[in-house]
Image: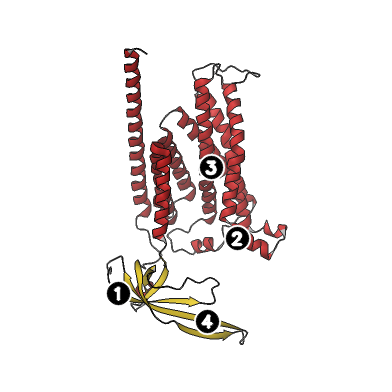
Amino acid sequence: MSKSENESENIIMKTKNWKGIFTYLFVTLIAVVYTIVGNKICSTDFKEQTDMDFYRAKVTVVGDSITDSFSINDGASWIENKVIPFSVELTSGPYKGKSVEVTQPIDSIYMNPSKEVEEGDNIIVANKAGMGSSTGEWIFIEHNRSNYLIILCLVFLLLIVLIGRFKGLATILSLLFTGSAIFLVYIPSILKGYNIYVSTIINCVFIIMVSLSLLNGINKKTLCAILGNIGGVAVSGILTLIMNKLLNITGFVDEDYTFLACLETDVPINLKAVIWGGVVIGSLGAIMDVAMSIASAMNELSAHMQKKSFSRMLKSGMNIGKDAIGTMTNTLILAYIGGSLAMVLLLTAYNRNVLYLFNLERIAVEVVQAVVGSIGILFAVPATAAFSAYIFNRDSKFIILKTDNP
């Protein structure tokens, strides 16, 4: 290779690097602005349901428990209530360093009460004054599990960086903006009373565009993946609307949805729309994976295929998609089953009548989530393959070759 060719190659590499840096900075800026502005709009004047404050604390001294027993059903069964007094040192908030007396109530009516506190435990406490009480009594809320969760998440992020290197950093940034869009914009918008359907669409498009742009840059491959992803998610959303109507879904799936309906909000929460949003958001990740895999493979085909044509690339894209369909569909369905395994076990244990089980609204919603999400994956395959075949061949003639292989 001559000196001039080396210099030209170095210039091209530097140009690509600068373009990549500019892309990351531009997409990051857009994502930050969206998150800040969206959170400000959706969180303004939001009425919280409780004014209770929670504090971290460390147990210093545990006293003797106080037990109170009484009978119910004419002595047929007994209820045992236990109260454990103990002292803690507050480790957060304005009272940090202060020692206070706390009580932990344990009722035998609950099958799995909280673990009894021991000296040295890290816990969460609250003051009853924040519950509308006139007393300043401190009560036990929960064991502090956040420290170990933070360590687990940090290990996860470290492994992403070690294995993925620069791509790993882009992945973390993508996860950060995805979480910000969900927890700082999407959820507050629902609680504020904005249209859930519109909010879901806006946030899904934002997550798709930002995530794929950060992971792969702004190019033809990313454009194909975005279009295929939007196509698959759109099919899932439309089909969910249809199934909600056909199945007469009321929205009162379980106690969580009932509590949502009881929230004191300016605009009542549309429970049917919450179900719809859950299906769309839940299927988004799997569809994104399939769309990006096919777009990436089509990009490589476009670069190395000798006789490139729309029909040949479309056929190849569909063949690639067939391999992805099985694994990603299994992934999505297993994820939903795993998330609702306890509910399925409980309902099956009490009644194994299939006719009864599959007509329960909560079971029907779980089936809709799993199947509709999988159908979205199925439609993402031809959508991504078709968009890719068109975009990578838009400067070429569409030559239909029935028997040639790439």
Tell me the colour scheme of the image.
secondary structure
Vertical relation: 323 (above or below) 331: above
Give percent across and percent down for residue 174: 41, 42
Residue 286: image tag: 3
Is label 3 or label 4 in front? Answer: 4
Disc 2 crowd rating (10 Å Cα; few below 14, some 14-19, many 20+) is: few
Name the residue carrying label 4.
Answer: 80
Vertical relation: 198 (above or below) 406: below
Residue 99: image tag: 1
Please state which amino acid type lies under the numbered disc 4.
Glu
Q: CA distance from mark 3 to mark 2?
A: 23 Å
The structure residue drawn at horizontal position 43% and vertical position 56%, both measured from the top left corner, is: 191
Q: CA distance from mark 1 to mark 2?
A: 42 Å
Of the 4 image quadrants, the one containing the N terminus is top left
Name the residue carrying label 2.
Answer: 343
Does dot 3 land on a helix, a strand or a loop?
helix
Does dot 4 land on a helix, a strand or a loop?
strand
Q: Earlier in the sequence, mark 1 or mark 2?
A: 1
Give percent across and percent down for residue 378: 60, 38
> Residue at the bottom extreme?
74
Q: Is residue 249 left or right of residue 218?
A: right
Q: Earlier in the sequence, mark 1 or mark 3?
A: 1
